[in-house]
Each structure stands twice: as structure tokens, then as C-alpha cells.
Image (cartoon, coloured by chain):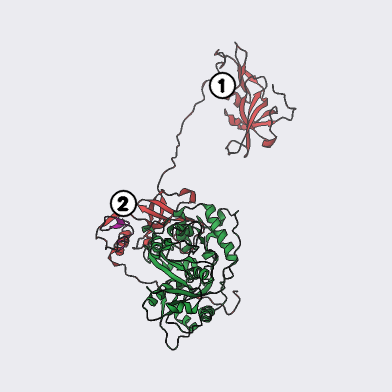
């Protein structure tokens, strides 16, 4: 296994509204930022994650390549999912041994349509999508299955929003109002303040293998474990209170082989943090989502990549020596990717 | 900025819908739905998957060709309450999404439950399907589920024919004439109104009737908030009235006075219907109304 490290991470200052920037315009600054940080102008491999349904334009990810400098021809790939999976593909590509660098990015503008119903399209077309089961509804079904203490959920939202306010890239969301009664339900038992904010944004990461990692960066964040696992799509075939796939991915990535100083979890709803903390068996002294996490900024299709980037940043900045980045996809944490990063 | 000329609406749509083949397994399930039956498919390990999938998600093995009718009732395992339904939701009124383990199934079906309010649902609630009028082979052939019947409303109504004989007939004949008839017990000297044939205290027979005045004093009363066809309005007052010269109060309605002004000790007088309308019935007396005399001290 080759040593592969994250050597640069950049993200946009995410917005809760459409600024009018096209997708290439959204991506360009973060691509340029990681190019400047590493001094690299070309990469052995480029891989992106996005979802055309967010913009409602088929193959919109292709035009996003205009931000890259794609001539002479580059080696490029795309995943129709969070950029975290693009990072996984790039990591696999680097294991081939013939290239040493990769550019990974993820982007999404969820302000353009109604994200709640757009995400219905990801459901199976025979049993779930025709019912109109929407994002908040299936998340609420999972919240019901978890049955978490309301105070614990409120505290997660409060902590996430407070951390988000001190993160220059996340949104400034107010403390949730404790006095909210049943009028505050989005879909019971989810309160409106449990719902992640609509967010536009992008992020980019540069991976480097072998000696190149040290050449580009004084504190590379080495990927010491990376694994993803998936569960049945249909909600009724799983125990929604648990995440067997996150637990399996965490074991395969070796989360428990050492202390975890910081874990950035792709928990869009507070009950998902509880499920993931248990699945990853994170110790009580692990700092969870110091960036504010998806409850403070949720640029869909970049949110998972940002979790890995934020976990890496602690090591790049010299603040931590072992961190975990997690990304999720599909309804109710169906698909989970866990990355263990070390100095 | 809806007025911004550089903002446009954009719709992504497949005109006429997107045609999909179902394959044999999902096709069988949807065909059975059209016949208003719900089937699961058995896996090699013997579990019943509902709705059926081509492969066992636990093992990846193809499922067997054995289809098992399940339900139609099931048990809610998890639910979420939608107070404000979206346009493409199955119901246009508040409802629940639920995971429903149909009887005989090993996995749960996701569907909507029309339960009226969230308090009507819990893990363990039994539900039954409500079918759409014209099933076509679609998951929405089950319009939604409804909670199992756990209570019904029974109507009770019997008719009777009552006859006023004995003492009551004597009393009502007095009422028809516009007088209250009572009776005095010869042995204990108590005066009873309405008239009765025996003394409830000493058991002695009461003989002759005694005409009593139609004035009296309120000893106690109740303010009633449920409408009554005989009452002037809601709220109305029913009261015990100690008719003058009697020893036992009589119950009657109070009228011509706001309910909150009625008090113990208040002097009242019967309000009779006009002489031409009189019958041998208590409806001869509309109610008792205040006389305006000073209140009486009740002992």
C-alpha cells in the first residue's frame, strides 16, 4: 500500500442563497487555491463529485470541467455522489503507482430547487419514489427509530451552530429557540432547527503519494485507513436505529487502532450524529465536528469531502495527530465512508 | 428577487412519465397489488421480503420463486408525522410515514398512515391497507394504511309509552287547572309536593290533596351548560324550590333571569302558559321566575 496524503484543502465561503455564480465559477476559486498552495498546475488524476439533479441540468458536471484547464487532455473521472467518493476513487487510482498526485473536488448548489423533494429522486423508482417520500420524511423515520433524548438532540444543534459561527466558511445560524413547541416540527420528531441549512458551496483537496507529499507540505495528513460500506437501499430492510455499514467501514479503516482527537461526521441531522458516534465507537474525549458540521453548512455533494478536508486541516495546521473524516450517502445513512488521517 | 429580469424558472420533467420495466419479481408484487393482495418473496434462508426484491440484501443470493401472501394488516415499527403534506405526498391532510411489518413478513414496508393525529400512533399500532378505487399495478394501489378498528360507536334508542296513573295523575290534573297539589301526612304532619299517596318518612297513607301556592324559595341550584329543549337558553338554571307551605322542595327550571344572578334564598313564582294552552303536563309551567321580593334566610 502506497503512502497517500492530503496535502491541501480549500473550501468556499458557503452561502445560504444562490449568488448567481455558475458551477465553474463556484469551483474556480477553490481549484486555484489548492493549486497555489501546492504549486502544482497539473495533476496525475482528477476526480469530482456532484449531482446533476441539484442544478436540473444533465451532464452539468462536464461543463464544470471548464474551471480546470482540461487541455492538453487530462485524466479525469466523476462520481454522481459526494466528492468524498471522488477522493476514494483518486486514492485507489494513486495506489496503481504510476502517478503521484490527484485533484479532488465536490460542489453543489442546493438553493436552486427544492432539495427536500429533489432527494426523492434518489429513492428506488418502484416502491419509494412514487410515494413522494421526501428527505425530511425519511430522516424523521430514522429519528423516530433512534428515539434519542430531545435534550441531547437540541444540544447537538446548539453546539453545531455555535461552532459554525466561529468557522468563517460555515453559515451564521442563531442558537435554536428552546421555547419552540410542536409548531417547530418539520416532520415529527424532527424539529425545524434539526434540519440542515440549504447551502451552496464547493471544496477541493489535493492528494499526493510517496515522496511528493513531503515535498508539497510540511505536515501531510496521511490516509492510514479508508473504507466504505453500504446497506440495503430499502428502509424497511434495515434497522434504522443503527448503522451497520458505518460500523463496518470504521473497523475496516481502523478507527479504533488509536486515539481519535477530532472526528468530522457527515451528520446532517442531530440523531445521525448519535448513530454515527456509536457506530464508529468514538471515545468521549473525541471532539466532534469542531467546524460546525453539516448542521452549520451543508453544500450537498461537497459536505462529505469537507468533513475529510476539515479532519485533514487539523493535521496540516499541526493541531492534531490523528483524526477521522466521515462521509455518508443515500437515504438514512445508507452508505458510509470512513477515513483515518494521521500526521 | 422575482422582479430581476435575469432570474428564470426552470423545470426538469419527463413528459408523460418515465417508462420502466419491472422485471419478474417487482412485476409480480405490483400485479398482486392490482388484485388487492400483498405478497412477499421467500429468500433461500426462508425469510419473507416485503416488498419483494430480486436478491436477498443480507446475502446477495437470488430469491426463490415462492411468493407468500402477507398482511393485509401489519404493525407499525417506526413512524414520522407530517403536519404539512407536500404536493406529491399520498395524502393532502396531516398523516404519518411509517415502517409497517405486515403479518407474515420479515421486513417492513414503507407507506403512509392516515391516523388523524400523531397521538393515534405508536410503535406497535396495528394498521390495515385502504385500497385505491382502481388499482393499476403501482405501489399507490395501496392508497394508505389506517389504524386497526379498536372501537366502534353503538347507537342505543328504545321507545316507551308512559302512563301517568295514581298520584301523578292527580297532581297533573291540578297542574292543568293551574294549581300545585300536595298532600299532608296525617301522622308526621309533613307536606309533600308533588302530591303522593304515602309518606316516604313514616309510610302512612296520605289521603286528601292540599292546594299549595305557586310561589316558593330557591334552596339550591345548578347552572347547566348543555342545551335542553325545555330550557330558555344555555346556560340555564335548574333549582330546588321549596314551595310555600311545603316541607320538601320540588325541582324546576328558573327563567327570566340571567343564570349568574340566581341565588339561594331567592323568591320565585311559577310562570304558567296562557289558560287556552293548558294541558295536564309540566310544560304547563314554563319555569319559575323571580318575584322581586326580598331574599329569604334559609335555615
Q: Which residues are magenta?
A: B35-56
For the residue pair B88 and A26, the one nearer the viewer reads as A26
Q: Chain of mark 1?
A: B
Residue B168 against residue A122 in the figure, above or below:
above
Q: Is residue B161 magenta?
A: no
Where residue A164 appears, as percent x and y from the top left, is 57, 65
Judged by its main secondary structure, the magenta piece is loop
Which is nearer the eye, A182 or A286?
A286
Regarding residue B113, the answer to whether it shows in the image is yes
Q: Which residue is mark 2?
A: B104
The Cα–Cα distance between marks 1 and 2, rounded to whole angstroms, is 71 Å
The picture places residue A196, in percent across and down from the top left corner, at: 52, 64
Image-quadrant location for residue B182: top right
Tell which chain the image draws in green. A
Q: Is residue A117 left or right of residue B257?
A: left
Q: Look at mark 1 in the image and give the residue it sits on.
A: B170
Residue sitting at x 39%, y 67% = A227
In the picture, one chain is red; tell me its letter: B
Amino acid at each position: 500500500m502506497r503512502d497517500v496524503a492530503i496535502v491541501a484543502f480549500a473550501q468556499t465561503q458557503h452561502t445560504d442563497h444562490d449568488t448567481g455564480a455558475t458551477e465553474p465559477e463556484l469551483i474556480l476559486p477553490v481549484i486555484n487555491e489548492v493549486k497555489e498552495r501546492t504549486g502544482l498546475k497539473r495533476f496525475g488524476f482528477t476526480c469530482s463529485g456532484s449531482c446533476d439533479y441539484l442544478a436540473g441540468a444533465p451532464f452539468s458536471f462536464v461543463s464544470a470541467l471548464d474551471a480546470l484547464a482540461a487541455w492538453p487532455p487530462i485524466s479525469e473521472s466523476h462520481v454522481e455522489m459526494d466528492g468524498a467518493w471522488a477522493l476514494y476513487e483518486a486514492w485507489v487510482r494513486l495506489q496503481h503507482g504510476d502517478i503521484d498526485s490527484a485533484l479532488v473536488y465536490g460542489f453543489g448548489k442546493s438553493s436552486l430547487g427544492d432539495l427536500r423533494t429533489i432527494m426523492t429522486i434518489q429513492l428506488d423508482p418502484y416502491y419509494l419514489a412514487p410515494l413522494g417520500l421526501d428527505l425530511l420524511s425519511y430522516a424523521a423515520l430514522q429519528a423516530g427509530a433512534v428515539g434519542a433524548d430531545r435534550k441531547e438532540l437540541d444540544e447537538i444543534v446548539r453546539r453545531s451552530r455555535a461552532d459554525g459561527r466561529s468557522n468563517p466558511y460555515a453559515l451564521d445560524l442563531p442558537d435554536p429557540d428552546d421555547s419552540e413547541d410542536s409548531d417547530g416540527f418539520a416532520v415529527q420528531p424532527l424539529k425545524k432547527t434539526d434540519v440542515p441549512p440549504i447551502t451552496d458551496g464547493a471544496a477541493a483537496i489535493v492528494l499526493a503519494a510517496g515522496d511528493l507529499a513531503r515535498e508539497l507540505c510540511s505536515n501531510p495528513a496521511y490516509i492510514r485507513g479508508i473504507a466504505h460500506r453500504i446497506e440495503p437501499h430499502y428502509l424497511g430492510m434495515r434497522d434504522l436505529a443503527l448503522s451497520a455499514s458505518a460500523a463496518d467501514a470504521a473497523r475496516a479503516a481502523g478507527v479504533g487502532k488509536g486515539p481519535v482527537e477530532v472526528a468530522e461526521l457527515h451528520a446532517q441531522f442531530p440523531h445521525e450524529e448519535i448513530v454515527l458516534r456509536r457506530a464508529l465507537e468514538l471515545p468521549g474525549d473525541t471532539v466532534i465536528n469542531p467546524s460546525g458540521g453539516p448542521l452549520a453548512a451543508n453544500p450537498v455533494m461537497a459536505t462529505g469531502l469537507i468533513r475529510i478536508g476539515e479532519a485533514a486541516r487539523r493535521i496540516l495546521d499541526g493541531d492534531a495527530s490523528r483524526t477521522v473524516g466521515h462521509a455518508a450517502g443515500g437515504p438514512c445513512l445508507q452508505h458510509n465512508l470512513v477515513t483515518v488521517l494521521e500526521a | 428577487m422575482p422582479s430581476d429580469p435575469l432570474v428564470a424558472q426552470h423545470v426538469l420533467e419527463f413528459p408523460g412519465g418515465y417508462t420502466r420495466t419491472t422485471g419478474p419479481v417487482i412485476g409480480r408484487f405490483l400485479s398482486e397489488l392490482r388484485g388487492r393482495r400483498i405478497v412477499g418473496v421467500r429468500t433461500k434462508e426462508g425469510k419473507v421480503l416485503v416488498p419483494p426484491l430480486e436478491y436477498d440484501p443480507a446475502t446477495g443470493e437470488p430469491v426463490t420463486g415462492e411468493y407468500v401472501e402477507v398482511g393485509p394488516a401489519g404493525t407499525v415499527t417506526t413512524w414520522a408525522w407530517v403536519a404539512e403534506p407536500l404536493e406529491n405526498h399520498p395524502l393532502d391532510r396531516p398523516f404519518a410515514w411509517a415502517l409497517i411489518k405486515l403479518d407474515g413478513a420479515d421486513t417492513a414496508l414503507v407507506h403512509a398512515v392516515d391516523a388523524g393525529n400523531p397521538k393515534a400512533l405508536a410503535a406497535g399500532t396495528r394498521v390495515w391497507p385502504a385500497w385505491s378505487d382502481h388499482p393499476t399495478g403501482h405501489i399507490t394501489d395501496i392508497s394508505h394504511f389506517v389504524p386497526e378498528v379498536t372501537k366502534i360507536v353503538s347507537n342505543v334508542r328504545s321507545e316507551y309509552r308512559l302512563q301517568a296513573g295514581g298520584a301523578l295523575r292527580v297532581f297533573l290534573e291540578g297542574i292543568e287547572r293551574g294549581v300545585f297539589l300536595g298532600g299532608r301526612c296525617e301522622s308526621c304532619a309533613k307536606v309533600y309536593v308533588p302530591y303522593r299517596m304515602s309518606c316516604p318518612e313514616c309510610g302512612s297513607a296520605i289521603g286528601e290533596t292540599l292546594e299549595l301556592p305557586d310561589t316558593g324559595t330557591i334552596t339550591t341550584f345548578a347552572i347547566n351548560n348543555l342545551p335542553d329543549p325545555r330550557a330558555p337558553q344555555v346556560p340555564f338554571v335548574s333549582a330546588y324550590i321549596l314551595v310555600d307551605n311545603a316541607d320538601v322542595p320540588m325541582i324546576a327550571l328558573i327563567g327570566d333571569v340571567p343564570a349568574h344572578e340566581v341565588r339561594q334564598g331567592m323568591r320565585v313564582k311559577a310562570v304558567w302558559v296562557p289558560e287556552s294552552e293548558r294541558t295536564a303536563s309540566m310544560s304547563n309551567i314554563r319555569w319559575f321566575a323571580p318575584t322581586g321580593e326580598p331574599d329569604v334566610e334559609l335555615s
